[in-house]
Amino acid sequence: MISVIILTKNESANLPTCLFSLKKLQAKVYIVDSGSVDDTVAIAREFGCEVYEHPFKNYAEQLNWAITNLPIDTPWVMRLDADERLTPELVTEINTKLPKTSQKVSGYQLKRRVYFLGRWIKHGGYYPTWLLRIWRNGLGLCEQRWMDEHIVLSEGEILSLQYDIIDENKKGLTFWTDKHNHYADREVKDMLSQDSNGDPLLEKQSYSQARQRRWLKKNLYGSSPLFFRAFIYFLLRYIFGLGFLDGKQGLIFHFLQGFWYRFLVDAKIYELQKQQLTDMQANKAKKIKTQV
């Protein structure tokens, strides 16, 4: 009935929980691995998954390679991360609703519930986060972006399911900060890129939350001064968005994800712009010297 695509690299800490949550789902599970050196592939095969190897460039290209090259023959496809799991209620809901779905419906969006250091992050505008994760085979592809990529459908309506995906990475805080440092490099590429072809999510997709957040990030946050916007964003999340109600874990999460990460992105943008200015000045001086 449905095929689940999971992209992996060194996910032995997270993958067993993810795959265990899929046991009662009427699904084929495909693992696309990009060079794991731990037990990821062995765990996947132990759970009966079909495993493929493919080099990783970015999430969008890897996912689109999977969508277009895997031998998927089910009516529906689902995207899932290795550090995510389905609640039992969501499994039942998918098994029940997908076979009865009208042909005019091409996708389902799901709520993501994030746990950080063992606590559900309920506030700061972080829950519910709606994501299009289930779509009809052949009708969905991932946006070509470095960060914040979404599935975009070529046609059809989108409905919402009631129950949640749980996102809980078990690799620890050092991994989390290292990962977000790499995310920041990718975020810089997206924020500085000028896409003449427009934004397919803003132009085509009908589900509202992702479009709204993308618009705000592009038109409001993106046009605000470097560094200052990170302070304002954190205050909006932690104070006005009641992030302080998430306890000590919430303080750490909202500060790191809502301030430190955004500030790091701005610092990398500033570093790049400063280097570009230095290069321009050096080239100008070189031309003047040549003319003399």
Image: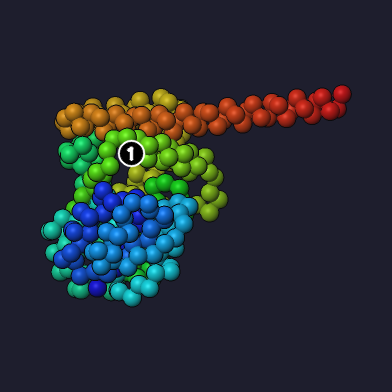
Q: Which residue is mark 1?
A: 175
In this picture, is 109 found above or below 121?
below
Say which amino acid is labelled 1.
Phe
Q: Position of residue 6 (x, y in %)?
A: 32, 59
Q: Quadrant of residue 3?
A: bottom left
Residue occupying the point 41% across, 41% down: 183
Q: Quadrant of residue 279?
A: top right
Residue occupying the point 41% across, 54% down: 35
Secondary structure under tag 1 reads: helix
Residue occupying the point 52% across, 40% down: 192
Q: Nearer the viewer, residue 125 or 141?
A: 141
Q: Callout 1 environment at 10 Å: few (<14), some (14 to 19), or many (20+)?
A: few
In this picture, is 288 found above or below 65?
above
Q: Nearer the viewer, residue 120 or 168?
A: 168
Q: Position of residue 54 (x, y in %)?
A: 44, 60
Residue occupying the point 31% across, 55% down: 40
Q: Position of residue 138 (x, y in %)?
A: 38, 70
Q: How many marks?
A: 1
Q: Is residue 278 visible?
A: yes
Q: Is residue 106 visible?
A: no
Q: Quadrant of residue 110?
A: bottom left
Task: Work out which quarter of the rendered image holds the N terminus and state it.
Answer: bottom left
Q: Position of residue 22 (x, y in %)?
A: 20, 62
Q: Nearer the viewer, residue 123 or 257?
A: 257
Task: Work out which quarter of the rendered image holds the C terminus and state it.
Answer: top right
